[in-house]
Amino acid sequence: MFNFFKTPEAPVAPGRVIALMNQKGGVGKTTMAFNLAHAFHHQGKKVLCIDMDPQANFSSLFDLPVDPDRKNVHHLLINTIKELRPLHTPVFLNDVRVTSAEGIDLLPSGQELSGFELTVAGISMPRQLILKKFIDKLELRSQYDIIIIDGPPTLGLLVVNILCATDGVLFPFVPDRFSEQGLRNILEAVKDIGEMEISAVPKNLGYIPNLFDTRRKQASEDLEQIRLNLGGGTIHEPFTNKVQFGKSLAQRKSVFHFKSGEFRDLQRQFVAMTETVHKELQ
């Protein structure tokens, strides 16, 4: 019988799990997750990123070489389910986990994750808790100060698993009606977690306005109206549509990689966000 998991390192301190979520795509969710991970890392935190989106955009930012045979987080999740033993693969955590040049760990995604819901459809254990049990079983909280999950822009079982596994959620959005509706939908999913009573409800860590157009006189009023429509909550400092984001993403680098002054404001915003997250989750 295969032993699929190596023994984790000795526990250091309990870490926190956060996710960035929005049902609407194209709002900068992955960009925010990538830079937030680097912000925590630059503060001396040990960071693990988990890509739970089958599109694997989060993984691509870590500049992994193309490898269709690479095992990913899907295989690790399936290996934790005893009822799916015939589908288990002889892969260890360290076979999947990669470390970036900066020292941030990643559990990459893969196309297999798109079939996750169908694969686990017939199991008897709570399907909503697979990711949570995976994190607990491998004692990942004791190995990392912060675990950051990038989720898919959907409302399926993957999203429910993420919400059940996290301590708190950040909600990136573009201040328009389509993105606002995506926020409403994901907030309904959070509410459903509470009604299911199978896991603690993740804390709302605030909304992150992205692509904010400061040239529009009504921009601030529109933003405030969205906040009121969503029932309150922290609004983080808006991110304007800066060319610096495009420059950093084109090179698959975080804004912290650059020393020039043009990136200083973005660096400050992400550091401020880490401080808010830390305070909210104490």
Image: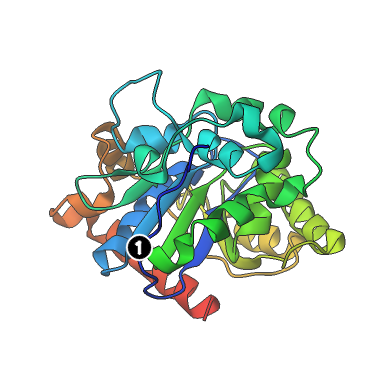
Q: Which residue is mark 1?
A: 9
Q: Callout 1: 10 Å neighbours few (<14), some, many (20+)?
A: few
Query: Percent position (x, y) of residue 279?
Result: 48, 80
Whether residue 30 sits left or right of residue 106 in the image: it is right
Query: Percent position (x, y) of residue 11?
Result: 40, 71
Query: Percent position (x, y) of residue 257?
Result: 19, 50
Query: Percent position (x, y) of residue 157?
Result: 72, 40
**The residue positioned farthest toward the right in the image shown:** 195
- Comparing 211 with 172, the one in front is 172
What color scheme is it? rainbow
Secondary structure under badge 1?
loop
Q: Residue at x 81, y 43 (%)?
A: 124
Indicate the quadrant where residue 224 lies.
Answer: bottom right
Tell me, yes or no, if residue 240 can be seen here: no
Q: Residue at x 41, y 74 (%)?
A: 275
Q: Residue at x 78, y 58 (%)?
A: 193
- Comparing 68 with 8, the one in front is 8
Up the image or down, 246 lies above or below 168; here it is: above
Whether residue 205 sits left or right of residue 183 in the image: it is left
Under mark 1, the amino acid is Glu
